[in-house]
Amino acid sequence: MKVEVLGPGCKNCKTLAERVKKVAEEEGLEIDFAYIDDMNELAERGIALTPALMINGEAAVTGKVPSKEEIKNILSKN
C-alpha cells in the first residue's frame, strides 16, 4: 500500500507523518511511505488543505490530523 503525507513541513504535517508510521508499525502493516513537501506537487495534485493523507493516490484525509484510531481504520480498509 502506498501511503503519502503531503504538506509544507508544518507541525501538523509532521505529526501526521509520525502517527502514520507508528500505526503501521504497531499494526504490522507494510507500507510504502513518503512525505511530500514540494508545494508545486501539492498544487499539481489539487491539495488545498494540509496536511493530506493519501492512500494509493487517493486523498483519505485533508485539512486535519486524524487520531491514531482513525488512521488505523483508514489503513486497515486498504
Image (cartoon, rainbow, N blue to C red):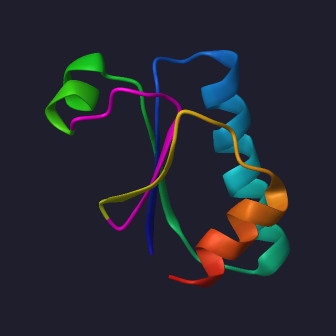
Which residue is found at the position 43% from the left and 28% from the top?
Answer: 49
- Residue 34 is situated, as x and y percent measured from the top left of the image, at 45, 47
Residue farthest to the left? 44
Front-lying residue, 62 or 55: 62
Residue 17 drawn above or below residue 20: above
Front-lying residue, 15 or 52: 52
Left/right of residue 71 with respect to residue 34 in the rendered view? right
Left/right of residue 40 with respect to residue 16 in the rendered view? left
- Residue 29 is situated, as x and y percent measured from the top left of the image, at 66, 79
Residue 16 drawn above or below residue 76: above
Q: Is residue 24 visible?
A: no
Front-lying residue, 66 or 39: 66
Which residue is found at the position 57% from the left and 84% from the top?
Answer: 77
Q: Is residue 12 visible?
A: yes
Any magenta on residue 54?
A: yes
Q: Quadrant of the N terminus?
A: bottom left
Any magenta on residue 3?
A: no
Q: Main secondary structure of the magenta part?
A: loop
Left/right of residue 57 with respect to residue 16 in the rendered view? left
Front-lying residue, 13 or 60: 60
Q: Which residues are magenta?
A: 46-56
- Residue 15 is situated, as x and y percent measured from the top left of the image, at 73, 33
Left/right of residue 65 with respect to residue 39 in the rendered view? right
Q: Picture quarter containing residue 76?
A: bottom right
- Residue 4 is situated, as x and y percent measured from the top left of the image, at 45, 50
Residue 29 drawn above or below residue 47: below
